[in-house]
Amino acid sequence: MSDPVIIALISAVAGGLPTLATIVSAILQSRENKKNFAKQSILNLINEDKTEALYGNMPDNYQNVLHEYDLYSKNGGNSYVSEKVAAYKTWYTDWQKRHIDK
């Protein structure tokens, strides 16, 4: 290869690194945003269900909580929300036994 071709290739590769870094950063930020949105959704849905139960209404967010938890886990969620969802599942099952399975 001639020197101008080598210089052109080096320039193209070096010039592409900032673009690649930007793309990787955007992907990671998108993943973090999805995780945080799912976390907030989960906590809100759980609170809604518990509030409804306090007023004697049937909690109806169970499937939504599980769906959001799948998204949360897929995007790198941690044990804090996992513990909240596990406790919610236990609470929901107990609530059903007391109110529906009579």
Image (cartoon, helix red, strand yellow):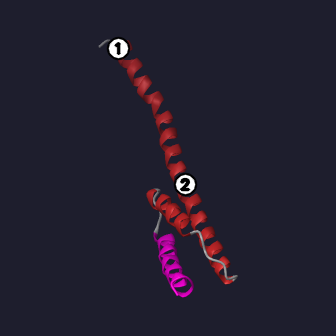
- How many other residues sit within 10 Å of disc 1, few (<14), some (14-19) or many (≥20)? few
Numbered badge on residue 72: none
- Looking at the picture, how far across and down is residue 102, in whole percent? 52, 87
- Residue at the left extreme? 1
- Looking at the picture, how far across and down is residue 81, in whole percent? 51, 70
Up-down relation of residue 87 to residue 40 (above or below) = below
- Looking at the picture, how far across and down is residue 17, in whole percent? 46, 34
Q: Quadrant of residue 49?
A: bottom right
Quadrant (top left/top right/bottom left/bottom right) for the N terminus: top left
- Front: mark 1 or 2: 2
Three-letter amino acid code of the residue under disc 2: Lys
First to last magenta residue range: 79-102
Q: Quadrant of residue 45?
A: bottom right
Q: Please tell me which of labels 1 and 2 falls first in the chain.
A: 1
Residue behind mark 1: 3
Q: Secondary structure at mark 2?
A: helix
- How many other residues sit within 10 Å of disc 2, few (<14), some (14-19) or many (≥20)? some
In terms of depth relative to the viewer, which is nearer, 25 or 102? Answer: 102
Q: Is 3 contained in the magenta span?
A: no
- Looking at the picture, how far across and down is residue 88, in whole percent? 52, 77
Three-letter amino acid code of the residue under disc 1: Asp
Numbered badge on residue 34: 2
Distance of mark 1 from mark 2, alpha carbons? 47 Å
Q: Secondary structure at mark 1?
A: helix
- Residue at the front extreme? 102
In terms of depth relative to the viewer, which is nearer, 63 or 73? Answer: 63
